[in-house]
Structure formats: C-alpha cells, structure tokens
Amino acid sequence: MTLIAQTIRGNVPIIIGDIVFSSKNGSIEKPYPGSLNSIHEHLTNLAFKPDDYFQKIYVLTPNLCIGLAGDEIEMKSILKELRIKVRYYDQLTFEILNTLLNSYIQENEFSGSKFIACLITKTNDEFVVSTSIYPADSWKEASSELFQEIRATGSGASEFISSVQKNYYYQTSPSIGNLTDALRVNLTMLTSIFTEQVLTLNNLKNFWGGGFEMIYFDNNTWRKFEEFAYVIFTGEVGTDGQLHLPYPSMVFHYKYHGEILIYSCIRIHKVKVESNENSIVYFAEECHDNAYAVPPLDVKSPFPEKDYKFSFNTNSVACGFFIDNPYGEPFRPSAHVEGDVINVTFNVNDSLAITIDNRLLRSFADSLKSFNDKE
C-alpha cells in the first residue's frame, strides 16, 4: 500500500511518491521513519504493516517519467519492460507511449497495480505535458488555491488530497519563474504533511508516507530532487498570546548515492540553544538517528546496513511548525527559503546543529496573529 501523486502549478508538473511498502507480511518491528515515539501500539491491529522501502517514481527518458503503486512483482515487471521498450524510439510521442502501456496491460498481469506516466514534448517552442493514468477509476483528482491539478492513487490518496487542499501558512523566497515557484510550494506542502504525520501518525492507518521522493522537469529533462532536509519544530503560544521559542523535534534528510536514496531520520530529545541578534542555533544534546536505504525496485542496495548513515551539511532545508494554540486550532506554518536562512549540519555519532534566521521566526509570530484573528 502506498501513494503516488502529481501536482501541477503554473503548468509545471511534479511527480511525488512515498518510500514505504506495506503488506500483510510486514512487521511491527520494522523501523519506520517519521515517528517521535514507538509505533508498536499503532501497528498491532493493522492489517498491513511496514515491510520494505523502495522507490516508486522513475525517470525513464529525458522527457518521460513514471510512478508505480501496488503489487511489487507487477511493478517490477512493467518497469523492466518500459525501460527496454522506450529506448527504441528517438521521438517518443504520447500516442506511442499509450500504445506501449495498453499493449503491456492487455498481455500481462497488472490487476493489482496502478501507474502514472508523464511525457513532455515540445511544440512551437512550448512544452506540452501529457499524462496517462491507469486504471482511471482508481485515481482521485482535485484542485486547490495552490494547484491547478492534483491527482493521487494508492491507500493514501484521499488523505494526501485533503492535506494538499488545506489552506496552510507557508513562506518561500521570491520565485524566479514557474519552475522554482512550483518546487518551493510543493516542498512546503510536503513539509506540512510531514509535520502532521510526525505528530499524529494518522498516515499509518492508511499505510502510506514515511518519506517522499519528487521528480520535476527542468526544461531539459526530468530530474529527481536530489538532496533536501526537513526540520519539524514544536512549540506553544503563551497566555500572553505570544509565540514561545519553538524547538526542533525531528530532522529528515535524503540524498541519492548513485541510484540509491539514503533517507536519514533524526529524533531530537534534548537541545541547547545559543542565540545572537541574527540567528538561533540549536545543538542536539540527545538525539537518536536511523537511516534507510531506499533502492529502485530493480536494483539491490549495495550498502550493508551498518553503512547506511552519512554525515551531511545543507542549506537546502524546509521547516514545519506545530504550535499548540489556546486561542484556536494548532498553528502549522511551513517555510522553504533560499540562502543561509536555515542550515542543518549532522556528523554521524557526534553532533547535530540547526541554525535558523531570527527573521523567519519573527515572521511566523506575525503570521500567528493573523491566523488567530481569522479563527
């Protein structure tokens, strides 16, 4: 059970897939990214439990990507077939693509699975986005203020669309072009979903989430978003109505090492805070980190389990906040801004430091006032 999805903003398509594969053969002992505490009690009575981790979205050619959900054997088979067949065509058209897909479905077992294929072609100096989904009645479609189109399938489809349609507070740097804008909005949207999942674990009931990949078209080729970090903060509003200093609770980091996605999850239990007029630095005094190798369906991970963990230092960060609010609903803003506004530095078995610009926290404090005024 899983999730694959597509969003379109400013005519820019983004393909999203989660990383957890659940099955009846899964185990409550399987490490699960995205929870602050033990999840045993949440999993015990579920029909499906986390079983493995693998990638569900793929770049097949510079102008074609695909997302898969469902039965592992069926997914591997169609992926292998398409990797071979699409190489035969110098100019792959949408008509040819649909012929290949329909032919495969008619000749092979695919009743337990679903796919999305997105092809980009160029006509009169304009890019044309063509999307094929199967089976059509298994896909849920919607729109929102942020996205012209949203479609999703898998066990998490309804919950994903509901999350994307929510009007949430977010902040990004001024965007140059539709592509940058679409990427930033999708990243803040995923941050909002991460925040919800970490604190409620509602996604476990529908067997999806845990982590996400994202594919985008950069005006030349489809690419996977290669490295990123999410930081989840928790905090509260005081009786004076002011936002108290929030604290980081969890860091997610992903980066591709060759074809293998290494997904790190760091739970923060105790921090020391240092501040100056420009920034706040959180040093983790107690934390627990896990790392997960997430290979493609058709590639075996070359990393022994003990070698999953990698140090990292990145400014490519989004942050999400869950603020307990006595004046209304919890406040859940998110942000992705360029430059040195947020930095995460992690050294395996040594240290974790998170630096955040004071101006970002002040902007959220101002947004909180507007949020409560509307409640």
Image (cartoon, rainbow, N blue to C red):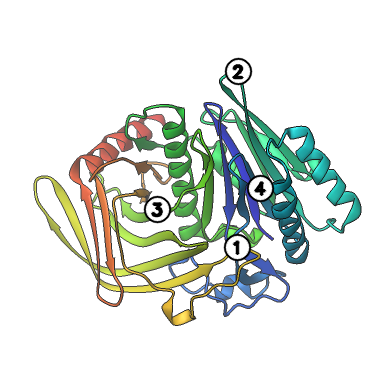
Of tags 2 and 3, which is closer to the observer? 2
52 above or below 62?
Answer: below
Q: Position of residue 301 (x, y in %)?
A: 55, 72
Q: Residues within 10 Å of mark 1 (few under 14, many from 20)?
A: some
Q: Position of residue 72 (x, y in %)?
A: 73, 65
Amino acid type at circle 2 is Asn
Res. 119 image quadrant: top right
Q: Pointer 2: what residue?
A: 124
Q: Position of residue 196 (x, y in %)?
A: 48, 53
Amino acid type at circle 3 is Phe
285 above or below 158?
Answer: below
Residue drawn at point x = 76 percent, y = 56 percent? 81
Between 84 and 276, which is closer to the camera in this rendering? 84
Q: Is residue 371 visible?
A: yes
Describe the element under mark 2 as helix, strand or loop. loop
Q: From this viewpoint, which residue is outermost toward the left?
A: 277
